[in-house]
Amino acid sequence: MAVHEVNHPLVKHKLGLMRQHDISTKDFRELASEVARLLTYEATKDLETEDETIAGWNGPVTVQRIKGKKITVVPILRAGLGMMDGVLDLIPSARVSVVGLYRDEETLQPVTYFEKLTSSMEDRTALILDPMLATGGSLVACVDMLKKAGCTSIRGLFLVAVPEGIERVSKAHPDVDIYIASVDERLNENGYIIPGLGDAGDKIFGTK
Ligand SMILES: O=P(O)(O)OC[C@H]1O[C@H](OP(=O)(O)OP(=O)(O)O)[C@H](O)[C@@H]1O
Ligand SMILES: O=c1cc[nH]c(=O)[nH]1
Ligand SMILES: [Mg+2]
């Protein structure tokens, strides 16, 4: 599994702003979307292109078009929705496949409650969106679901992850590549990422 920690100064700066303890819902939401946009730029930089000759203003001109599998964006509810607008800014025609998962607060096990994938998953590259990769249970469950639907090309975009979660996913799904704004230190006794962002879903939806 390729793990890309994106070290662009804009990513680091914006993520740093998100760590402020009293950040407003508005600012957190805007920054989540902005960082997601920058991660998308990075996660799509190896997409293949092909030449195509079109009618330009001064006659025929050869341009490049993205070829290969079409992208479906896969936000994991709820918090993944906070990254979706930023991703769709760059890939506006992407289909959206919604996955509903929450992490049981006691057991930290993922619980699936919604699945609405787009058609022909075998022909698409999935871009999973979730701000947090903690124990990795939610990501493993999401990838299991996508693979069951026939998807063979899967990438994930995360704001913050920890090494133990990355390790778990790399063992279960070594073929999945992930793009992360920051690999943080560890999980605390409640399964929260330290230093992390706190509860990303609550901050994006203002449910604290
Ligand atoms: O790697 P894991 O240990 O599985 O934890 C990560 C998951 O936990 C959070 O979701 P949460 O359960 O808080 O749901 P929410 O988005 O509805 O708040 C987060 O958005 C991930 O989906
Ligand atoms: O730190 C964490 C871990 C899981 N989910 C969150 O929202 N935050
Ligand atoms: Mg949450």
Image: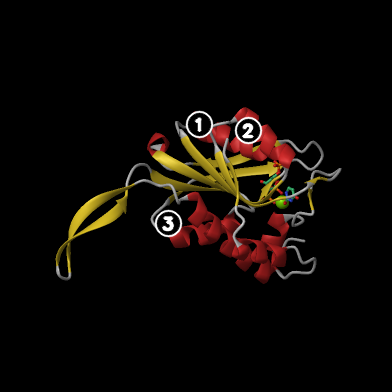
Q: Is residue 139 left or right of residue 84?
A: right
Mark positioned earlier in the residue sequence (1 or 2): 1
Q: Which residue type does callout 1 highlight?
A: Lys
Query: Looking at this rendering, what residue extends furthest in the right direction?
Result: 189
> What SS does tag 1 mark?
helix
Residue wearing tag 1: 147
> What SS does tag 2 mark?
helix
User: Image quadrant for the C terminus?
Assistant: bottom right
Front tag of 1 and 2? 2
The reply to whether discs 1 and 2 touch (Cβ–Cβ < 8 Å) is no
Mark 3 surroundings within 10 Å by alpha-carbon count, few (fewer than 14), some (14 through 19), many (20 or more): some
Q: In the rendered image, is residue 135 in sight?
A: no
Mark positioned earlier in the residue sequence (2 or 3): 3
- Identify the image's colour scheme: rainbow, by chain, secondary structure or one colour: secondary structure
Mark positioned earlier in the residue sequence (1 or 3): 3
Q: Is residue 174 left or right of residue 67?
A: right
Quarter-of-image position of residue 133: top right
User: Image quadrant for the N terminus?
Assistant: top right
Measure how far apart labels 1 and 2 are at the Cα level: 15 Å
Residue wearing tag 2: 170
Q: Is residue 84 left or right of residue 190?
A: left
Quarter-of-image position of residue 16: bottom right
Q: Which residue type does callout 2 highlight?
A: Ser
Mark 1 surroundings within 10 Å by alpha-carbon count, few (fewer than 14), some (14 through 19), many (20 or more): some
Tell me, for residue 91, which label it has, or none.
3
Front tag of 2 and 3? 2
Tell me, for residue 206, which label it has, or none.
none
Q: Which residue type does callout 3 highlight?
A: Ile
Estimate the x, y position of residue 150 in percent, counting from the top left: 45, 31
Mark 2 surroundings within 10 Å by alpha-carbon count, few (fewer than 14), some (14 through 19), many (20 or more): some
Estimate the x, y position of residue 81 in percent, counting from the top left: 58, 55
Q: Nearer the viewer, residue 124 or 42?
A: 42
